Image: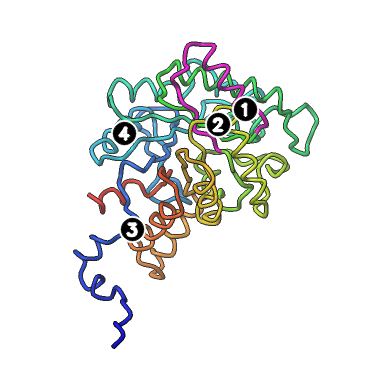
């Protein structure tokens, strides 16, 4: 008599058994929470398009980071809103810039928390683009080589302030190599680079641009961010960044590009990060507030999908509520 075909129904019969055979597990230590540092004191300004997230003054950043540490969250990535902007992005690499001040405060008040910094220029330029644009050019075409110098100076200034890791998000050609040379040349050879290696020109960044006050004043970023249709190009970009010295590679956004996270995991044995971006966060929160989705289940399912695809590091605005559920 033939044996019956095995189906794992009995293993799904109880939560204890389901947990025992679960293939993909989440841990708060995998999460990095993006934070937005702004001038002032006692500032905690909620971002309208991203409920539950705030523009924070340095003292409030410290309070937030202390909570991250208590929750066992892996760390934070800092974005800066400077006091003023100009066409040279000078606030990005100023020694007393807003991010540099936030790094120092976290180092003093919350020792042991991983501090990553976003290395870009869009929050600091008067026109909202990620690099140098020649005077009179209204098409938003960035001068790649001039921008590399800004990025290298910014990365060094962050490392000097105490950043554990820098994360270039600009998508300029050759930026990883330029930053690696600058870090090594200034005595920061142990500061790793987490590269936004496959960053797409995505509609899902909309809420972030309110948070970071970085909407381009003209043109768009499609001349230097990737076409969402191009998966093979993404693999090429990742390979180039690894050759230039990237220690961790990132895919951004996460949800529409799970196939590329999985493809990168199959191809490279390196740490892979994914950024669950503002639009991914906001649409779940909005749907939950309208009663269309269960907030916690949608949050955890989305994070599990990103981890299952192959990301070992997840940048997410859900870091705190997810950590509480996992705790």
- The residue beneath circle 4 is 65
- Image location (x, y in percent) of residue 251: 53, 45
Dots 2, 1 in contact, CB < 8 A: yes
Range of magenta residues: 172-196
For mark 4, does the 10 Å Cα neighbourhood hold few (<14), some (14 to 19), or many (20 or more) residues? Answer: many
The residue tagged 3 is 23
Instruction: Specify the label residue 168 is tagged with.
Output: 2
Residue 276 in percent (x, y) is at 47, 49
Give percent across and percent down for residue 165. Answer: 44, 27
Image position, residue 63 (x, y; %): 29, 33
Question: Residue furthest toward the right?
Answer: 136
**Residue picked out by circle 1:** 175
In which image quadrant can residue 301 be found?
Answer: bottom left
- The tag earlier along the polypeptide, 4 or 3, is 3
Q: Residue furthest bottom?
A: 1
Q: Nearer the viewer, mark 1 or mark 4?
A: 1
- The residue located at (74%, 37%) in the rendering is 140
């Amino acid at each position: 008599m033939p044996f019956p075909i095995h189906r794992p129904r009995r293993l799904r019969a109880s939560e204890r058994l389901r947990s025992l055979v679960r293939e993909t597990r989440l841990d708060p230590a995998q999460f990095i929470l993006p934070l937005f540092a702004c001038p002032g004191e006692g500032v905690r300004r909620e971002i309208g398009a991203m409920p539950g997230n705030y523009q924070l003054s340095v003292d409030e950043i410290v309070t937030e980071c202390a909570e991250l540490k208590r929750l066992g969250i892996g760390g934070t990535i800092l974005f800066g809103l400077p006091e003023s902007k100009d066409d040279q992005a000078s606030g990005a690499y100023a020694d007393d810039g807003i991010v540099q001040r936030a790094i120092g405060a976290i180092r003093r008040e919350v020792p042991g928390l991983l501090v990553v910094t976003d290395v870009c220029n869009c929050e600091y330029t008067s026109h909202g683009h990620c690099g140098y644009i020649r005077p009179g050019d209204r098409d938003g075409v960035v001068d790649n080589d001039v921008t590399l110098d800004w990025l290298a100076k910014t990365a060094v200034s962050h490392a000097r302030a105490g950043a554990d890791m820098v994360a270039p998000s600009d998508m300029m050609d050759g930026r990883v190599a330029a930053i690696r040379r600058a870090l090594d040349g200034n005595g920061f050879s142990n500061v790793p680079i987490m590269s936004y290696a496959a960053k797409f020109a995505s509609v899902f960044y909309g809420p972030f641009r309110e948070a970071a006050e970085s909407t381009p004043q003209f043109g768009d970023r499609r001349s230097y961010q990737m076409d969402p249709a191009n998966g093979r190009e993404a693999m090429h970009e990742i390979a180039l960044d690894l050759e230039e010295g990237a220690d961790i590679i990132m895919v951004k956004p996460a949800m529409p590009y799970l196939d590329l996270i999985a493809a990168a995991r199959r191809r490279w044995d390196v740490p892979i990060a994914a950024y669950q971006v503002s639009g991914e966060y906001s649409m779940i929160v909005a749907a939950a507030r309208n009663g269309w989705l269960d907030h916690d289940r949608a949050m955890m399912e989305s994070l599990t999908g990103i981890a299952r695809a192959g990301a070992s590091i997840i940048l997410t605005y859900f870091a705190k509520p997810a950590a509480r559920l996992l705790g």
